[in-house]
Amino acid sequence: MANSTWAITGLGELSTVGIENMLRVRSNMADDEVTFDAPGDMDGAALIAYGETVAITKDGAPWFVGRCVSIPRIGTFTEEKISYRVLGPWHHLNNCTYQQSWQLHLDGAVTSAFKSRAILGQDVNGNTITNLAEVRDIVEFAKSKGAPISVGSIDTGINMPYEEVRDLMCAQAIIRCARWTPDAVGWMDYSEGGDPSFSCRRRSNLTAVTIAISDAQAAAINIRRRDDLLVPGIKIIYETNIEADGLYYQTIETDSAGTTTDLFAKIFTVELTGSMTSQNNLPTWEVETAPVGLAAAIYATYGTPYYQGSITIEEDEVSGSWGPGNLLNISGGASEWADMSAVIQRVSEQVDSGTTTIEFGPPTQLGPDDLLSLMRTFSMRNVPSNEKSRTTGVTSHRWLKLQFPGGNGVTLDPQDVTFAEQIFKAHAVGSNIDTTFGWPRYVVD
């Protein structure tokens, strides 16, 4: 930190306070953190209290802000110090339970209330929304609960199958949604001042940066092409039930991208939700609409090669020129590196030495760097039992079956035939036809 003035708001310049070994780490959909040491008596008073907000500036401009979550005290034969760990707003997303508003029957009336059961892919009015629109809703919910975060640039995303979840932290819900577009990157921007902004954009919309390995600043490089992650095709089979002539059958729709007949193509099966509703006083089976373009979105992630590795840059002081939200190209090496568009996943910046390490590669939010986690996303998805209950408060219908002599009958919604129900109740005798009046048998399902 030879040229710039580094400071912590409320404490002063780092050199004056005696803070050293400052390290900032920024990650894709994971905790950003800053750690530093304050040499001195390990049993002395801490400079910063647990839970306190820490704002760090570089030449007066915002560089990082977060919450102090750990204050380890360390002593050896040769030194003593108090260390500090500060986490960015993803920490708040990791600790805030995601809730959605539901229509519920409370105190004799249907009213809205929040609960920790959520249907991902559905807005408060019951409309289908994209996976990244759901991400926006999650961030806005966390902000409404007090998280120090604002909404940055979030892409449109694609329609995702409804997924019913409960008791998820906001960060978990964001990752759950982002898995449907595995090339999406989520990161915090600390440069604007005020609350850091969270952005989530897909690979095609990220900004590319180029580093020349012939430059003396490039101290080390490790890179490999991940051909093992390439897939020739993606096929998604959507299962649903349909009603025909009073019977229910299973049917399928397919969504494909690439060459799906290849041995190494990946095939996924997705169960769509369905529910019974009333139209014109008659029961109607309504099913979730199959998402459009999901196969293409996944194929866009795994149909083009990823490059994985790291590069270390030595500067007079860390510039912060690279981070999650950028694609990395490297000039001066293999020709294919010049436009490889490697996705930056993690950047570590050592303030004292001016050393920056950039890690890039395939999506990290899936877990292991292969397709197994993506396949588990499909197989472990929890299908909503009734996706309409969130907006209506109704969990099931009580259908009125009217059975006439000779076996003919009709099924009506009692909400629409209250008067008829009263008549049939008055003249029905057990489960038999009242021979005096000839009324049909009354059955409640």
Image: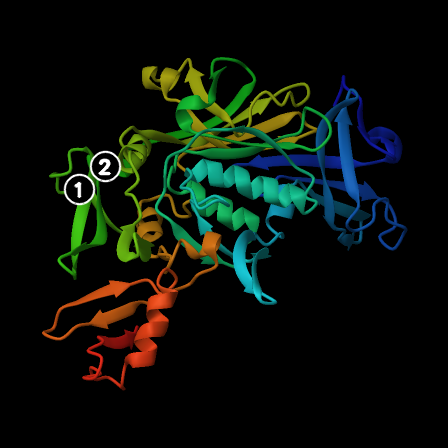
- Whether residue 403 is visible, yes or no, is yes
Which amino acid does the dot numbered 2 rest on? Val
Residue 29 seen in the figure: no
Q: Residue 227's x, y, as percent?
A: 27, 33
Q: Which residue is mark 1?
A: 264
Give the image quarter of residue 296. Answer: top left
Q: Which quadrant, please, contains the C terminus?
A: bottom left
Expressed as whole percent of the image width and height from the top left, the position of residue 441 reads: 23, 77
- Secondary structure found at label 2: loop
| Residue under the point 76% across and 20% down | 2
Give the residue type at disc 1.
Phe
At a point 28% along the width and 81% down the height, the residue shown is 428
Number of numbered discs on residues: 2
The residue nearer to you, when weighing 144 against 352, is: 144
Tag 2–tag 1 contact (CB < 8 Å): yes
On screen, residue 66 above or below 444: above
The vertical placement of 205 against 345, above or below, is: above
x, y percent for residue 370: 33, 44
Helix, strand or loop at mark 1: loop
In the picture, measured across the screen, residue 340 lies left or right of residue 38, that is left
Which residue is nearer to you in this view: 375 or 391? 391
Q: Nearer the viewer, residue 6 or 74?
A: 6
Q: Residue at x 75, y 53 (%)?
A: 72
Residue 231 tag number: 2
Left or right for 115, reference 252: right
Residue density around tag 1, few if under 14, some if 14–19, many if 20 or more, within 10 Å:
few
Mark pair 2, 1: CA separation: 6 Å
Badge 2: few (under 14), some or many (20 or more) residues near its Cα, within 10 Å? many
